[in-house]
Each structure stands twice: as C-alpha cells, then as structure tokens.
Image: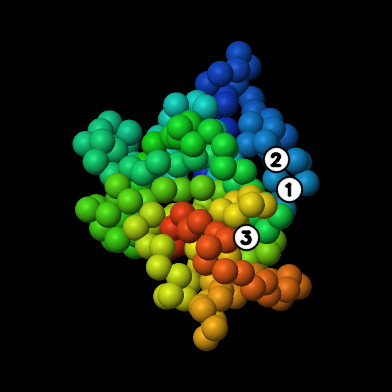
Amino acid sequence: MFNINEIIEKLRDVLSSEKNNGKVFDKEIAKALELTSVNFATMKKRNSVPFSNILDFCALKKISINWLLYGQDPSSLIDSTDKYWIKYFPTIAVSAGGGAYDNIDEYEKLDLPNFFIDIIGGKENLKNIEAINVIGDSMEPTLNNGNIIFIDKTKFDVNKDGIYAFVNENGLFVKRIQRRIDGGLDIISDNREYPIQVTDKKEIKILGKVISSIGKVF
C-alpha cells in the first residue's frame, strides 16, 4: 500500500528544488497537483493517492513515476522503461455523461513496474493496452472518478460479459455490458442510481475491455 505522506515529501523535495527559499507548503503541493486545499487535506487523511494528478505532475516535471511511487533509482530504470510502457492518454476521459475522444495522437509513455505487467497480460500484451481516465460516478464502487483504466484493444467480444469502453453517438463510455437472450445488449452502470439501458450491437463501437485500473477506493 502506498504511503501518501512519503509521496508528498518527495513532491515537496521536487518543488523545493525550484524555489529560492526552498520552503514548500501543502497549499503549493495541492496547486501543483491541481487539487483544492480541501481535497488535498482529505486525500492526506484518507491516505488516498491521486494517481492521475501525480502522473500529470511527473510528465510536466519530467521525473520518473517509478521513483516517486516506488523509490527506484531513475538510473536503474533505463532498460525497463524502454521495454515496459504503454500509451496513456491524459486528455481522454470516459464517463457516464459522454466522454471525449479527442487528441488520440497526444499520448504519454506510462512506465510500468514489473509486478503490474503480469496483471495486464504480460509483456507480450503491452502493445495492445492503452490507459485513459475515468470521470463521473456511474461505475462506482468498481471504478471511481479519477481512476486510470487499462483497456485491452484486442478484447471486444461483448458476447463475454465484462466492463468495456465504447463509443456511440453520444460520446465515450465505460460500462458493464451483458448480452441479452434476444441478441441485444444491457448497458449497466455499477452505480445503481443509473438505470440499465438496452442497445443493439450495431449502435456502439467497442474500443476494448477494461482489464485493470488504478486510483482511489472508497
């Protein structure tokens, strides 16, 4: 389990190196992560790591996410980061209300720790995996706002129940899909406040199956 206080101290060190007086306050760290002071305080209290914010911070500062989260020496990661990374699209968000699927060519390299590679299908499968963000609460408690989801683009057979990312005329979505006896599809939000919708396979384009995620757990 990650220790948010240890991560915050590393963030403080990074920001301190950029200041003349070197002293960095929590409000400055919150601002650097694009969090409000209230959300930052809640995050500390709950030991909750805002992964998507941290990934954006690391990309901006050009520092290793492996160093920040796992304490690995960046110089030891040269070989592994060349091999073990996937495309992460920080500007693409998937939601209940219709997400955006713009800037598909604007991706970042998301370095992966070795233990996580097997979780998403092994190193041979990395070329098939892409990562995008979740916004909204329609898939709570399975997926929460701010989670990063990993999509296997080779898995789009909705005859097999699962959580899929898909596009229809209203935008980009992530939902649980179950095939009906009559051939239609039930589009299910794990948050029961959202009703089940029924659609036809012809009405949606499957982008891939969600095989893992990282982010907050409530």
- Residue found at the very far bottom of the displayed protein: 181
- On the image, the x and y values in percent for residue 103 come to 53, 33
At label 3, counting other C-alpha atoms closer than 10 Å, the crowd grade (few under 14, some 14-19, many 20 or more) is: many
Distance, label 3 to label 2, CA atoms, is 16 Å
User: How far apart are the two marked residues, 2 and 1, measured between alpha carbons?
Assistant: 6 Å
Q: How much space separates mark 3 and mark 1, taking CA atoms?
A: 15 Å
What residue would you read off at disc 2?
35
Q: Secondary structure at mark 2?
A: loop
Q: Quadrant of residue 182?
A: bottom right
Q: Relative to the observer, which residue lies in front, 143 or 101? A: 101
**Residue pictured at 63% horizontal, 36% vertical:** 33
Which one is nearer the viewer's eye here, 192 or 33?
Answer: 192
Question: Which residue is found at the position 53% from the left and 21% from the top?
Answer: 17
User: On the image, numbered disc 1 is attached to which residue?
Assistant: 39
Seen at 46% across and 54% down, the residue is 207
Whole-percent x and y of residue 138? 68, 64
Q: Mark 3 — residue?
A: 144
Expressed as whole percent of the image width and height from the top left, the position of residue 11 reads 55, 35
Q: Is residue 174 visible?
A: no
